[in-house]
Image: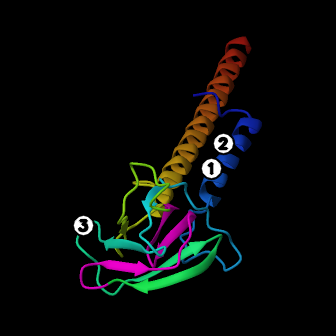
Amino acid sequence: MSFLKTSCTRFVAWSLTLALLAQGPMLSAEQRGPDEQIPVPESVTQDVKLSKGGILTARIVDLQGNPVVGEQVSVMFHGKEIAAAVSDENGLAAVSGLRPGLHAIVTPTGTTACRLWNAETAPPTATTVPAVVSDAEVIRGQLGAFNLPMFVVLATSVGALVVALDANNAAEDAQAQADALAARVQALETASP
C-alpha cells in the first residue's frame, strides 16, 4: 500500500479523517437556537370542503388511527393563528368563520397543509373532515442507522484505518531502508581486501 507514502497524501488522509471527526450531527428542533430556522418539508396538501358558515371540522388521530382527546389545534393562515380549538372525546375539533385558501392545521406534534374550499367550488376529491395525525411518538430526522454513535464509530474506524496504513507504510519504508543498507554493507564487505 504505497498510496500513503508521500507527505502530501498523508496530509490529505489525515485531513479527511479530522474533517469526518469534526462533522457534527444534525441538530434536533430542541437543540437549535431560537433564531435558527427549521426547514419545513413539503407535505401533501389536503383539499377540504368547508361546511356552511366556514366551519372546518378536523379529526385528530394518533399513528394507529385512534382519536386524540384534548389536543390543542390551531388553524394558521400566512403564519398567523386565525382560529383555535381543542379536540373532543371523538378526536374532533371544529372552528368556524374560515374562508377558502391555503391553511395549516397545527397540533403540538405536527402540521397538516389544507386547501379550504367553499361547498360550491370544492373539487370532487375534497374531504369534509380531514384527518390530522398528532402523536407524541413521531420521531423525524433521525437519519436511520446514521445517528451520532454511528458517526463516532465510523470516524473512529476510518481514523484507525489511516493510522494502521500509515504505520504499515512507515514499517515498509524502514524495512526497505534496512534492506538497502544491508545490501550496501554486503557490497562493501565483498569489495574489501
Q: Badge 3: few (under 14), some or many (20 or more) residues near its Cα, within 10 Å?
A: few
Circles 1 and 2 in contact, beta carbons < 8 Å: yes
Q: Amino acid at mark 2?
A: Ala
Q: Is residue 171 above or below residue 103?
A: above
Q: In the rendered view, how is the structure colored?
A: rainbow
Helix, strand or loop status at disc 3:
loop
Residue 192 vs residue 155, the one in the foreground: 155
Can residue 147 be seen here? The reply is yes
Q: Which residues are magenta?
A: 88-117
**SS of the residue under disc 2:** helix
> Where is mark 1, residue-wise?
17
Q: Is residue 51 above or below residue 178?
A: below
Q: Nearer the viewer, residue 127 or 40?
A: 127
Q: CA distance from mark 2 to mark 3?
A: 51 Å
Q: Residue 65: which numbered mark, if any?
A: 3
Q: Helix, strand or loop at disc 1?
A: helix
* Amino acid type, mark 3: Gly
Mark 1, residues whose alpha carbon is within 10 Å: few (<14), some, or many (≥20)? many
Label 3, label 1: how far apart the Cα atoms are: 46 Å
Q: Does any portion of residue 142 appear in the rendered image?
A: no
Separation of disc 1 and disc 2 at Cα?
6 Å
Report x, y in % for residue 93.
Answer: 37, 79
Name the spot of residue 111 as percent of width and height, x first: 48, 68
Residue 54 pos. (x, y %): 49, 73
Q: Residue at x 24, y 79 (%)?
A: 90
Residue ID for mark 2: 13
Residue 92 falls inside the magenta stretch: yes
Q: Earlier in the sequence, mark 3 or mark 1?
A: 1
What secondary structure do most residues of the magenta stretch adopt? Answer: strand
As drawn, 1 above or below 126? above
Amino acid type at mark 1 = Thr
